[in-house]
Each structure stands twice: as structure tokens, then as C-alpha cells.
Image: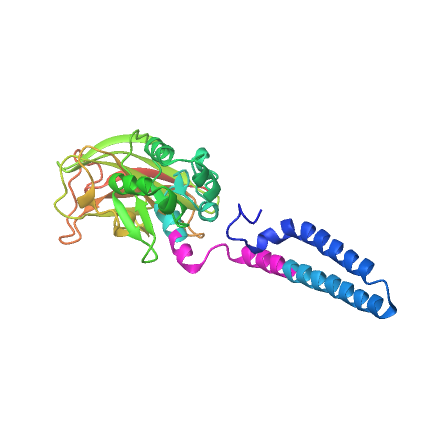
Amino acid sequence: FTLIQVPLRDKHLPILLPPLAIMAGLGAAWLIETAWTSRHQRRLAGLVSAGLVVGLLGVYVWQTGQVYAAIRHDQTEYLNSSKQVLVDFITRFTAPDDCLITDDPTLAFVANRPVPPPLAETSSARLRSGDLTEAMLIDIAAQTDCQLVAPTEVRFKRTTPGFIEWAKGHYLGLWLYDQETEILIAKPLTQPRPATATNIQLGDQVELAGYDLTKTEEGAVYLSLYWRPLRPFEQDFTVFVHVRDLQNNTVINADHQPYDGRVPTSRWPVGQTIKETIRLDIPPDLPTGQYQIMTGLYSPITVERLPVINDASGENAVIIPLVITP
């Protein structure tokens, strides 16, 4: 076991404890048998045996305490503070059904994002044995259109560096979220399937092909916009998202740079579809009923909006209906 499992960790002690106890027992029995020739030696053998028993019990009690301490820690804090920053980013700028490619299953669990089924288990053993190869990772990423690659445990980087290089060439953004770990963001979609098609053109710059609205049990609404650039962007535009009531009052303002500025519009490739998501946190005291989302693009320099062809809003905005329910 010690030859195939390197390094040994605390979690391996329960596996090793039974054979260690047996060997210790055999050793103690041998000592007692060989030392049974005199009263003094019998006493010494008894003391040694008792010492071994007490020592093993001490190790077991210590290990049990470590396990329970780890369980209590995991119940309150799954990730360190730097990874929590990554979780906050994922839960704000990706939709609940956006898959995540990662070598850290805890990250996917805490962020509540699905992973492609073939990547539900990405252990070092699976990668080293060839059960999960570089070519398989590339094929899965190419087919699934997951919007983030987060190799935070460095297993992918260490065993499949070609996959990381492939991702750098196919994802639009790269973020060193902890000044070291590379997170790849926003892969142009191979098969865009917006829930609602719009095909609304904003000037001669970009087309809004469609959108998704996803509501969560926590009361948030995710708005995903599917953009298709018609020509290169000469500057980086801001996405405006205003939720209005029927009196045209703005009740939620979610203006933002795509992916928090990490995938600016100047990087959007012409002719390809980019899925861009923002979470709308609905105030708990907001009345239920009919609302409208006004969205589009504007220049942060001039605050001028891109003109919407056949604009129905009167303010160069695409109108998306929204119903707030209890």
C-alpha cells in the first residue's frame, strides 16, 4: 500500500490501523512468550504490552479527534477564502445550467454547477492511469460548451498540459484569480440554443440572437444574453440591464462589463456566439407582478447606446418581459 499511495495522508490511517494492530499484537505475544521465564521478565513484558496498547489507543483517539475536527470544519467552510472569491464569480456570471470543467469536485459542489458526466471523477489516479486522457478532456470541452475551465487543484495542469494550452486558445478570457491559478472563461458556443430567439440587431455592430431567463429557489433570476458580433468592436462596451416596473421605474440596475471585465467586447470574435450571463438579485420586498428588463450596450466613454434596429422601447433597448412570482 505504501508503494502505490504516495504521499500517505491522515485519511489512510483507518486502512493501515488493523494490520498495524495485528503486527503489534503478534510482537507483544512474542515478547510475552519469550519473557515468561522469570517473574521480573514477566513484569517487564506486561509493562511493554500495556505501553503498546495505550500507545495504539492514543493514536486512535487522536486520529478520531482529527476526523471530527475536519468534519466540523467542512460543515462550516468548504473552501478557503481565495476559492470563495472564485465561487462568488461563478455564481454571479454563469447560469445554473452552465457546466464547469474542473479538477476540484468540491468547487463544483459549492458553486452548484454541473460538470460533464465523464468528468465527475478527476482523480490523479484516473489521470495517471490513462483512464482520462488529454485528448478526452479536449473532446469533452469542445462538445459541451462549458463556460469555465477551473483547474484549481493543478491535476489538469500537471498531467494534461496540452488540454490547458488548448483551452487557452479556445476560451476568450484568462483570469489569475489567486495571482497564480489560471481560470479560462467564455468559450464561443458551437451550438447556441437560447430559450427565446430575438435576432435583434444593434447598429451594424452586433446581433442579440436570443436570451434565457432562469429563476432559482433562492429568489434570484439569471439573465443570459446570446451575442453575435457582426464586425470587430473598436472599444469595450458595457452591458446595461435595468429591471423596470409598469410605471417605468428602475427597481434593479445590473449594468456590468462582460464577465466582470475579463471578457471585454473587443475580444468577441466576429460571427461567433458568446453567452454572457448576469445574476439579478430580486429584493425580498419587491412586489410580485409584471416587469420589463431593458438591456443593450453602451460606451462607457460617451454613455451612448448602440442603436437598436426597429427599436420598440424609445431608448435603444431590447425589452425582455419578466414576471416576479412569490
Q: Is residue 184 visible?
A: yes
Instruction: Provide residue 169's location: percent of width, then percent of height.
Output: 24, 40
Where does the image place residue 297, in percent across and percent down from the top left?
20, 44
Determine the residue positioned at 84% across, 66% down: 42
Q: Extreme bottom residue here?
A: 40
At 78% across and 65% down in the image, what residue appears?
50
Task: Name the residue nearer the viewer: 213 or 159.
Answer: 159
Q: From where the camera sits, is residue 248 visible? A: no
Q: Residue furthest right?
A: 39
User: What colour scheme does the image use?
Assistant: rainbow
Q: Position of residue 302 (x, y in %)?
A: 13, 53
Instruction: Say which quarter of the image contains residue 312.
Output: top left
- Type of secondary structure dominating the magenta stretch: helix
Q: Nearer the viewer, residue 301 or 14?
A: 14
The image shows a total of numbered marks equal to: 0
User: Residue 231 lies in magenta, yes or no?
Assistant: no
Question: Could you say which quadrant of the image residue 21 lies in?
Answer: bottom right
Tell me if 177 is positioned left or right of 106 in this view. Answer: left
Query: Where does the image place residue 105, in percent across and percent down from the top left?
Result: 47, 45
| x 82%, y 67%: residue | 41
Segment colored magenta: 65-86
